[in-house]
Image (cartoon, rainbow, N blue to C red):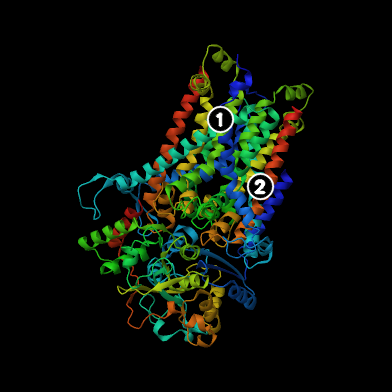
Amino acid sequence: MAAGAPMGAGTSSHIYEGNAPRLMAPSWIFIGFFLLAPVIMMAVYSFLTKEFRGGVIWEFSLAAYDQFFFDRGLFGDEPPSIEWTYIGIFWRSIWQAGLATFVCLLIGFPTAWFIATRDPQSRSIWLFLVTIPYWVNLLIRTVSMKFLIRDTGPLNEFLLQVGVIGEPLGLINTNFAVQLGLFYSYLPFMVLPIYAAVERYDFALSEAAADLYSGAWTTLRLIILPVVKPGIIAGCILVFVPSLGAFLAPDLLGGAKTFMIGSLIEEQFKGNAGNWPFGAAASMILLTIVLCILLVYARNQNKTEIR
Amino acid sequence: MKKLFATTALALISLTVGAQAEGKLSIYHWFEYIPQELLDKFSEEYDVEVTMDTFDSNEALLASLKAGKLGSYDVAVPGDYMVEIMNGEGMLDTFEPSELSNFGNIEDKWLDVSFDQGRKSSIPYQWGSTSFSVNKDVYGGELDSLSLIFDPPAELKGKINVLDTAGETLTLASLYLGIPQCSSDREQLKELNALVQSAKADWASFGSDVAKDVLVSGDAAAGMIWSGFSAKARGEGANIEYVFPKEGMIVWMDNVVLLKDAPNRDNALKFMNFLLEPENAAAVTNYAQYTAGVKGVGEFLLPEVANSPESNPPADQKGEFVQACPEEVQVLYDAIWTNLKK
Amino acid sequence: MASVTDLRRFPGFLAITLTCLVVLYAPLIVVAVYSFNASTSITNWGGFSLTWYVDVFTGPDAPKFQRAAINSLIIAVCAAVAATSIATAAAVAMTRAGRFKGKTLSFALINLPLMVPEVVTAVASLVFFSAIGFTTGLLTILVAHIVFCIPFAYLPISARMQSIPDTYEQAAMDLYATPRQAFTMVLLPLMTPGILSGFLLAFIISLDDFLITNFVKGAGVETLPTAIFGSVKQGIKPNIMAISTLMLGVSIVFVSLSWLIGRTGQNKK
């Protein structure tokens, strides 16, 4: 069974049989009380009535979801039509996260492949090099990126002095900068699982393909990709999910100009709006999207394992 | 492992208990608004350990207190309309003038203010204005109108930072259009919505705490900013001018309020009294470069601060306080804001 | 016939890997270099100097950042110890206690912190703490950190345990060791590398967290990331670069440590 496969059921032994409740209790207490309960409470809050300027009134209401999905005009008296504002914010976040995932894959796959095909000694050094930046505080990395690419930052200074460009590139406060930030934040999440998959890849398959006159790219497409697919999918999920709710990159690199899911939710609890049920509803919708993705992933995973 | 647990548990208990010990003062303040030396001075004079958290908008202050922080701070520094809102929310404690020996130092015009009649829960901190500043290296034209922000000339397009708060940004936009605040008139609100929508295309970023830095670093060529913050930016080398727009600007007063359920009420009052001392009020002014609401600060002020162009608007300059809108109107402004940032 | 190495090579992959490393390292290196800048204006190079490092330890902001650093360390150590202990117990249950009721659910629960988006966790914790009247402070940060550190500690520990056959413990019990003795004297030593890397992972994850901490921190409590965020929002100052570079150094030391531990663990096997 693959390392890190969920259950470990195959290798399960029975030495401490009967002790499971005692051993699991701390996990249940901590995660159950301090994460599961709060999330359930948010679910409840999303169906309550909002209190002006923050807080909830204990009265059932669908207003939060209604506000999310239906547009009743600025004054709330027009016939309802589909509200695109929030769907748009979610869609943009999903698109943004998807693009970041795609770019990570495009760069991460060759990198992972390259590392996994070195000899074992230099392999661990390459791996070490790729993972170090990940261990540096995310905030500091994002700030460093901002410093580097802003109009008066070293990158533009350098390019101006060399004469490659006539005026600053204007990278900061753009979607490109946010993309760069997300890519920078989560690339190792893509490289590591793919690396693990490639490492287990049996190159006899490539040899067999080559014997049958398959070119390198055809082999990559038809033989290698299907085999390392689980690693790629795992990497995509590990990049996509945190990118979806990312807060720092849009805030620091994107200029906080447009709401993303993260800042939209934050705004309801910490900023101008003070609409808790709406923030709770947006949280629940985000959570549902993420759980759906994970569920599809888990089911596919099970299928491949049964095969 | 068990020992390790016990020690860490002990350390934690001592930490949490320590946080409730006497001789403490917990302040919730705007960022970059009080010099550390002044806090140290208070700390030494009264043997009180001071901790301070910061916020970057009146709304953030309110939201944070609503979400459970009330009861952990002693004093906060909301702006005028927010004092009124917080009072309505029952977040403020009251004191008697006799509890503050320096109460008489409050300037007369700031004593009977609409947002806190007779100063029962608050004392003046600083007052100033909100408008915008323009980098003179980038734009050489006349600096007299809010149109530079809401309908900018080509030189400034895409180089403007605006404050990330609905209150101030939408109020300035209303001033530009000549719409009364808290208007619920359909046509006016639609006009307001259209204005900010079209202006947004010319804005580079939203940010309150970065308002000074973007002007100093050159990331923005124009930016909405508070008067004293602009003076500080100028002091840090930005070639900018603070604009007094003919359409009017926002005038505000920030106030130190005594919070309900303050864990250290006595120290809070000592601190408020301390801030009413002319020398200390002047120290704040010298640092933040706004104007104090306390008598007798004149002799302690640095001349360049007292005479700064930012704090001395032309005599006929129009200014308005931000109003706290009723709920049914506020939701409309919230909708415009969300619509703006979607 | 093509040689084996040729099959492993694709044109351009080396170039992409190098580009990747450049993108990953450029911002960090630039910040590290500029932290030694003598000039107060952060974009102009004014010669080499340690001014900003001195400023970090003695400047006006020094007490604030020192307190924040101490808070960060206390929380990271406590959260990592607690999360590692909880995760070890859970890993034993998952791999050594056979099938039990709610096993699938327990597995999902342990991984829940990884599944819930961070911003949702942050907001939910804030609202929950406020609803149950748990005054925010250092303790609320710690509790939140323990929760999201558990799965990170669990992963390496359970991976390690799955690779240890239970024959060792069986043998010990055949020699009349009690289950407790079999655990402490046989299994625990074998698991040590897994536990250590679980601990380090949890430690770093705790040290790294900004978003959740920012929501659940109490009055006057800062950790290093929240203090840095507060300062950075008003502009990137040279002292922040010095702090960042110091943290970069600490991180590198830690990764190297966990790397070395991981290697010794493999050698023992």
Disc 1 crowd, CA 10 A, few/some/many (<14, 14-19, 20+): many
- Residue that appears at 69% across and 61% down: C50
Q: Where is residue B17 in the image (x, y as percent from the top left)?
A: 63, 61
Q: Position of residue A221 (x, y in %)?
A: 49, 22
Residue C103, placed above or below residue C228:
above
User: Which residue in the rendered view is the most extreme toward the top?
Assistant: A212
The chain under label 1 reads A
Q: Is residue C185 left or right of residue C61?
A: right
Q: Where is residue A1 in the image (x, y as percent from the top left)?
A: 59, 22
Residue C75, placed above or below residue C159:
below
Residue A194, labelled with which disc?
A: 1
Residue type at mark 1? Ile
Residue B242 vs residue B227, the one in the foreground = B242
- Residue that appears at 69% across and 37% down: C195
What is the distance, in whole Å, between disc 1 and disc 2 at their CAs? 24 Å
What secondary structure is found at the residue carrying circle 2? helix
Q: Position of residue C38 (x, y in %)?
A: 65, 63
Residue B330 vs residue B159, the one in the foreground = B159
- Residue that appears at 55% across and 75% down: B266
Residue type at mark 2? Ser
The N terminus of chain B lies in quadrant: top right
Query: Where does label 2 land, which residue?
Result: C251
Task: Decide if residue C116 is in sight here.
Answer: no
Residue B118 vs residue A20, the one in the foreground = B118
Disc 2 crowd, CA 10 A, few/some/many (<14, 14-19, 20+): many
